Image (cartoon, rainbow, N blue to C red):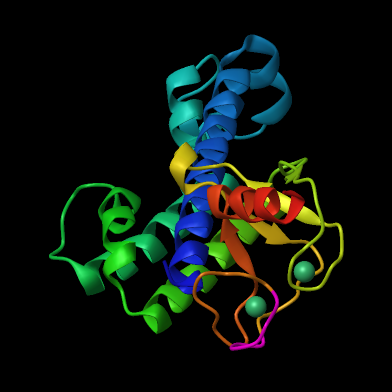
Amino acid sequence: MHPHHLHAHTTAHTLDTARRRLARTIATRRQVVDQPDGLRSSTLGRRSSLGGHGDPVGTIALLGTREHDPLADLAQFVGDRLAAIADQLTPPSPIDPMTRLLPLLPRLQPRAANVAARCFRMLTGRIDAALPAPPRLTAWPGDCPGCGVRLLQLHDAGPRDHWTVTCGAGCTCTGDGCPCQMPIRAQGVTHIWLRTTLTATTDRKAA
Ligand SMILES: [Zn+2]
Ligand SMILES: [Zn+2]
C-alpha cells in the first residue's frame, strides 16, 4: 500500500477514536449538569429564560445547543468537515461520514489520500487541544530503518491488521535508495510502515 494510503488509514482511525472520546466527554458533562449540584453551580442565572427554577430538561437542552457547549460546537465542526469530504467522493447520505470514508480510502489517488490524511490530522488536533490529556502513542521497539533514531511509535486506533508504526523523529522518505524499507518509497512522505511489515523486516535483520 502506498504510504499516503497508510497515513490516511491511520489518521482516519485516530480521528474516529478522538471523535468517540469527544462524544463521551460531551455526554459526561451533560450527566454532571443533570445532577442537582451541577444545576446550581453551572447554570445559575439562566433559569429565568428556561422556565424558572428546577427545570433540568430546559437546562440540558440549552447545554446541548451549539452556542452554549464549545465541545458540541467542535463535534459539529468535525462532523461537517468529514461530511464535506465524504460528499465529494460519494452521494450524500445520512450515514456517518467516517463510516462512508473508511472503505473509500484505499481507492483514492495517493495525492487525494494525502489531502484526506492532512485534514484528519488537523481535526484530531482540534479535538486533542479541546480535551484534557490526549492519548499517548505506544513506543515500538527498535531503531527507525529510515533515520536510525529509536523513536518508533505504534498507531493502534483501528483494526489490528491496519496498525501502523511511524517515526517520532519525523523523518521523511528520500525515494529510491532510501534505507527505510517501506515497500513503496515516495520522496517527501513521512515514513510509515504496517506493523506487520516492520516486524518482518526486523526479524530478517536479526536473523
Ligand atoms: Zn526515522
Ligand atoms: Zn524512505
At 30% from the left and 58% from the top, the residue drawn is 101
Specify the farthest residue to the right: 149
In the rendered picture of this protein, how many numbered marks are placed on residues?
0
Reply above or below: 194 against 181: above
Where residue 99 appears, as percent x and y from the top left, is: 30, 48
Specify the farthest residue to the front: 207
Assign the magenta stretch its main secondary structure. Answer: loop
Reply above or below: 26 against 7: above
At 58% from the left and 24% from the top, the residue drawn is 28
Q: Quadrant of ligand 1?
A: bottom right
Decide if residue 67 is in sight here: no
User: Does the segment drawn in magenta span residue 176?
Assistant: yes
Decide if residue 86 is in sight here: yes
Query: In the rendered view, does 191 fall on the left or right side of 68?
Result: right
Which quarter of the figure has residue 176? bottom right
At 77% from the left and 63% from the top, the residue drawn is 144
| Most foreground residue, 55 or 170 | 170
Which quarter of the figure has residue 139? top right
Specify the farthest residue to the top: 36
| Most foreground residue, 119 or 156 | 156
- Quarter of the rendering occupied by the N terminus: bottom left
Where residue 151 appears, as percent x and y from the top left, is: 83, 57
Where residue 186 appears, as percent x and y from the top left, is: 54, 84
Magenta stretch, residue numbers: 174-179
Where residue 60 appears, as percent x and y from the top left, is: 48, 27
At 56% from the left and 45% from the top, the residue drawn is 18
User: Does the segment drawn in magenta span residue 57?
Assistant: no
Reply above or below: 98 against 45: below
| Most foreground residue, 35 or 21 | 21
